[in-house]
Image: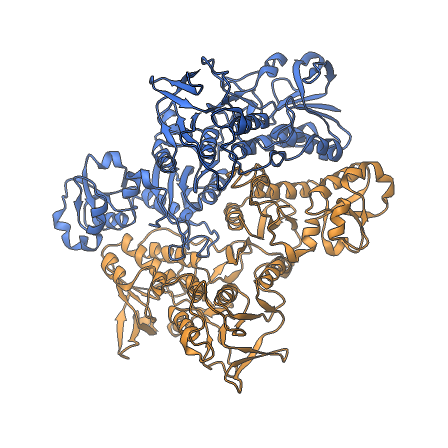
Chain colours: A orange, B blue
Amino acid sequence: MKIIIIGGVAGGASCAARLRRLDEKAEIVMVEKGPYVSYANCGLPYHVGGVIKEESHLLVANEQTFIKQFNVDARTNCEAINVLADKKEVVLKNVLTGEEYTENYDYLVLSPGAQSVRPPFPGIDLPGIFHVRTVPDARSIVEWIEKGNPFMSGMHRYSGFQTLRPKTRAVVVGGGFIGIETAENLIHRGFEVTLLQRGEQILLPIDEEMARPAEAYLRKNGLNIVLNDGATGFAKTEDGHLEVQTNSGKNYVADVVILAIGVRPDTTLAKLAGIEIGKRGGIVVDENMRTSDPNIFAVGDVVEVTDFMTKEQTLIALAGPANRQGRIAADIIAGRKASYRGTQGTSVIGFFDGTVAWTGISEKTLARLEEKDYEKVYLYPNSHAGYYPGAKPIAMKVIFRKSDGKLLGAQALGLDGVDKRISVFAAYLQMGATIYDLQEAELCYAPQFGSAKDPINFAGFVAADVLAGDMPISHWPEAKKGFMLDVREGFELAVERVDGAVNISLGELRGRLNELPKDKTIHVICRSGQRAYYATRMLAQHGFDAKNVSGGMLSLAQTHLFSSNPD
Amino acid sequence: MKIIIIGGVAGGASCAARLRRLDEKAEIVMVEKGPYVSYANCGLPYHVGGVIKEESHLLVANEQTFIKQFNVDARTNCEAINVLADKKEVVLKNVLTGEEYTENYDYLVLSPGAQSVRPPFPGIDLPGIFHVRTVPDARSIVEWIEKGNPFMSGMHRYSGFQTLRPKTRAVVVGGGFIGIETAENLIHRGFEVTLLQRGEQILLPIDEEMARPAEAYLRKNGLNIVLNDGATGFAKTEDGHLEVQTNSGKNYVADVVILAIGVRPDTTLAKLAGIEIGKRGGIVVDENMRTSDPNIFAVGDVVEVTDFMTKEQTLIALAGPANRQGRIAADIIAGRKASYRGTQGTSVIGFFDGTVAWTGISEKTLARLEEKDYEKVYLYPNSHAGYYPGAKPIAMKVIFRKSDGKLLGAQALGLDGVDKRISVFAAYLQMGATIYDLQEAELCYAPQFGSAKDPINFAGFVAADVLAGDMPISHWPEAKKGFMLDVREGFELAVERVDGAVNISLGELRGRLNELPKDKTIHVICRSGQRAYYATRMLAQHGFDAKNVSGGMLSLAQTHLFSSNPD
């Protein structure tokens, strides 16, 4: 049996290694058009920033490892240029020599990944404009920064004590993972960085109100984020700088430009092979990662996958799913059972000291699907026990089904414990958990690690109280139009208050119920929602129509959620 | 409706607050015999060490909070001294004035907690011998350290620049959470600390081979751990120090002694009330936390709970379960539905830079139950991507059912990411997950947070390979008696080798198969088990009977598992 694997990074490399372990005798050829196999794309922005100092650290395994340890015929600088599916042949080309030759296969595995989106903007080929997709991309950026650009020569070698030349500017186009991570790293390199985002928010997979604090935190750390404006072209200024032209007509001068507009599946070869391409532009595969040609499998960023939650077909460029898909294709080829359960889209991004992470469905996706059977809660629990030094609030949005409490999605951000909580949410989501299961979570607790009632438990408690009708909630857009009762203490209002809200502190509320209207919905506000919960319960039992404004002031003042002050 | 709650800390305080939220009109009396309600027991060792500087930080909510915010009649320094269950009356005593009086109730909730075990050893009442169970306990220790003991006066005020007096000694009796945490904190205070543990290991809930690296790491950080020796008595030496006498006949001089031998349910009142006490010595409750008297509930450390995994009755003194049980009792009293699902025993302890955590069944529990239908794997994945700086190995033991792959338990230790992984395991365990679910886990991945194949995925991959028969494994005791093949590189053997093992590196193995016996089981060894896996697969496919020695050298050399070197 002979298997040819096209693409030697995440999905392809996983497939080759797994296949060898399952079948010692199979002939396995793995070709990669670039100079490296199995490298760490996700580390590229950190290599640009000098956090990962050596390029060699990005190379998880090399060609020789595959050849020697796995007896895989690994070929770098080898591009597949055609597939003759009816003959089960692939045409390969040595990109260094130009030599072309044909190899036959029993099974072909396509793992070509995705390509950086590169719009046909004027000037896009000017020197100093880069993608961050491959090791050579990163090397080019580092070389450009360190010696390529006459305005920067020698100024930006990474060092804790570097002398900054004022006004050395970078423009990053695109506010997704790669754009933000690279922007942060360029700031660490001493650049003044502007990030252009065509849409209304960065980090499109999460909801807008959760992106806002991320934007504010990035700005606080020196990133100039411009929303609702996208690049339209590039030019060279008279004095030799780059200029980024935008939709708004505003131009940005830059000494280096990073294009991080997104990726699209690299289906060039799939089209030549005549296999089915889906509506989203990725290769169509079944749950065994098999394409429309039974002898051709496809894995990784190039395929359309089923969204685990919505059951829609979607494109997800994530390393974890790519690795697991590679294993599954190998299992099937080796005659095992395996299937891909779909992708939850669990993601995390860190910048400066902050973290944003999410899993499952966002509210905007529910809106697109016109799904109404859901509720959401906002909460701001501490990352660990508040009485132990160093606790930081975690801003959490948890979305669940109203009719049965099923967990649908979670988004979180903060300075500590965020990746842990979203990983736990991801496990619950995978297992089909409800918010009632979250109530009963029994997670690690010692004061430096969590709380006796972990943020996960709290999410369950709050959501269950909402569904039980014990805590009717409202959200700010609705609350602002109605009667608002602020139950915080007077001194808290001095710092920040809501126009039009009546203030009666929780401690005084039982004695001043006569000041409140019985004919209106009372939207109860406190700092995070906890005291408002007590007040809401109290009011409801005294015959008032009260709702807790979910997340209180912290949900309103989203710009300072990345806080080092525990709630 | 009038509810009296005995005990104002975790379970009792949670019950009172929840009850008020559910029922604005109920009369709620919460009595606490100590001077504080709702304080953080789990923080006490850190207050002794000065990490939590102010005693007030330990007080999560005070009496006035309960009175004002919750309209709960909270009474500190108020001891319940009798229960007349037939009359639904409780006899209370003001411990400051000695006044006794009777209160009637509709429902009584017992949350008296547990008492420190205090054996009738000679000299146990000598000054300088302390428990670490209450705020006054911690205050007494701090006072003793700072000014009570003439040998230490003024020497140990917490400061980063303190001058240490040589040979100021502490003895901690007991190697559980409190003993270890207090020992660490006393080391930070400048003491020479000896920890006496009667049994063969510290941290009894985990398996011995997982306790060993914890012991080694504590020793490396200056703790003198003495196993298999317990205190038998205490005396004062001629020069005024304390002396701890032990089973072995060896005596230890100390300037302060901490007794952390364990706790037992405080059932004094339960016995007076005539409610049923179980075989383990705790109050028997049903899943609604109701005792044998339908008007009396009990929650927290005082009750016997069902072990979620074994379904046995057990005693678990953990804050998380106590809090949730308090909520459940309140729900039931208020006419809601709620039930306690049992306790997994999820736990975590941190000391110095290390963490040990676990959830579910240990192997020693399986042995006690004479359960044979299980397998275990050891693995040592990195806490995050190895190519990003700062990754640390996590030592993991994962136990699962052989017949169906159900996850049974997990134990882990290391310098980073341990609490996160055990919290994720805990969520899977709760949801009845199998190792196949772990394979499909989709957790947070960016290089500073995890790996494309997270340690959780790896645990699933390894376990599934074992169950599929793809990777027969053995464990060291068996391997050492058989034919051992070490597939590491020569230079690795120079550092550490196994007597009697044949060495053929993985890269050379395919060419040297003729050197291996076909009539013996070959136990294959590498550093962590990964290369041995490749070798085992290769050998099996060439007709050898090969087993991967699970966890390789890292499982053998358990004493240096807390490592800062990624694998």
Q: Residue at x 51, y 28 (%)?
A: B153
Residue reaching furthest bottom?
A238
A163 and A310: which is toward the camera: A163
Image quadrant in which the C terminus of chain A is located = top right
As displayed, is residue A528 above or below residue A54?
above
Q: Mark yes or no: residue A480 visible.
A: yes
How many numbered discs?
0
Whether residue A315 is situated above or below residue B362 in the rendered picture: below
**In the image: residue B93, left or right of residue B386:** right
Any part of residue A284 in sight: no
On screen, residue B237 above or below A396: above
Horizontal placement of B295 versus B374: left or right?
right
Between A340 and B556, the residue placed more toward the observer is B556
- Of residues B189 and B375, the one nearer the viewer is B189
Location of residue A431 in the rendering, given as x and y in whole percent from the top left corner = 50, 45
Residue A500 lies in quadrant: bottom right
Placement of A445 over or under A4, stated as above or below: above
Residue A173 x/y as whole percent: 54, 72
* Residue A244 % position (x, y): 55, 79
* For residue B140, side relative to residue A304 (left or right): right
Q: Position of residue B491 (x, y in %)?
A: 21, 51
Residue extending farthest left: B514
Residue lying at 69% horizontally and 55% vertically, measured from the top left: A557
Is the N terminus of chain A in the top left, top right, bottom left or bottom right quadrant? bottom left
Q: Horizontal placement of A334 versus B442: left or right?
A: left
